[in-house]
Amino acid sequence: MFSRFLVACLVLSTFTGCILFRSPPVDSVVYLNVSHAKTDKCFVNSGYADLGTLYLYDTKNEKLLELADIKFTGTKTGHTYEKQEARDIEGMKINIMGNLDKLIVADAKAKIENGVYIELTNAFKEKYRGTFSDLARTIREKIASGEDVRNSWFLEEASKNNSRYRHVIVYSTIKADKAKIEYANSVVIGGKIKLPAKGGGSIEAKLEESPFEKFKGKAVPVFVDYHIIRTTKGRNKNNEITYQFRVDTDFRDKTKRLLAALKKK
């Protein structure tokens, strides 16, 4: 019974914040961080990226460095949804301080992953055709203008065999006019909840401030998805160096590794 009450208050009031539990009898605290979490739709856009945001990805140190915003010029594709739900939240991090039962926390985390969802209003999933053509065009233009992106964007290093470097680009977004987090069909944004504590007393669930508060207005990019890119080098008919790009289909554990890199940004 207690675990059901606990789950009811382990609610995600924000996409990028933490949830704080206090149990006065044992002075225990649980922090639940969902920054950059992965859902069945896309990744939570905790970094406020948009279509075309390009990163350098050091796969050895699992770090991302933002390089530029690539302008997409191809045909836009997408779907509009009056309502859309994002479920199966992965990548939540729990830190425990105090004497709160870890089994209770683990049980609550499992129920959150299965029961908490994000509902979007007036959502639009957007992406463009020719993403890699636009990336190659941008590089040609920058080289022609005298920018040394071959080195500053690590194109030479990334094109080597067995390179540790990849590039990552936001190729798809889900934008919405409104987003709310729900559990068991109840909106769980804001406020405080007091629950019976194990062994007596009560637990206060306090919803902490979050950077997600910056997401306000129409067509906000709430979710983003990424391509991990493999770079190769060649020459064109004029014997000029060119770069080609493809999705790295051999990249293993994409979600797990991207979550780790995104949380380091």
Image (cartoon, rainbow, N blue to C red):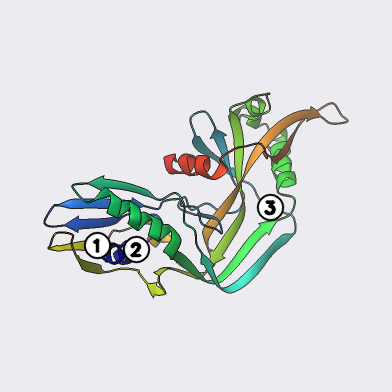
Q: Residue at x 35, y 68 (%)?
A: 189
Left or right, 32 with respect to 138, comes to left
Q: Amino acid at mark 1?
A: Ala
* x and y, in percent, of residue 61 in the image: 48, 30
Answer few, some or many: residues within 10 Å of disc 3's Cα (few below 14, many 20 plus, some between 14 and 19).
many
- Tell me the number on the disc at residue 205: 1
The answer to the question of whether label 2 and label 1 lie on touching residues, with beta carbons closer than 8 A, is yes
Q: Which residue was labeled with disc 2?
A: 11
**Residue projecting furthest to the front:** 1
Please report whichever mark, 2 or 3, sits nearer to the chain's N-terminal start. Answer: 2
- The kind of residue tagged 3 is Phe
Say which element carries label 3: loop
Q: Identify the image quadrant of residue 161.
A: top right
259 or 7, which is in the foreground? 7
Q: Nearer the viewer, residue 26 or 168?
A: 26
Q: Position of residue 177 (x, y in %)?
A: 51, 70
Residue 204 placement (x, y as % from top left): 20, 63
Q: Is residue 137 visible?
A: yes
The residue tagged 3 is 72
Q: Is residue 17 visible?
A: no
Q: Earlier in the sequence, mark 2 or mark 1?
A: 2
Q: CA distance from mark 2 to mark 3?
A: 37 Å
Q: Nearer the viewer, mark 3 or mark 1?
A: 1
Q: How many marks?
A: 3
Disc 2: CA contacts within 10 A as few (<14), some (14-19) or many (>=20): many
Q: Quadrant of residue 129?
A: bottom right
Q: Amino acid at mark 2?
A: Val
Say whether disc 3 or disc 1 marks the residue closer to the N-terminus: 3
Q: Tell which tag, 2 or 3, sits nearer the viewer.
A: 2
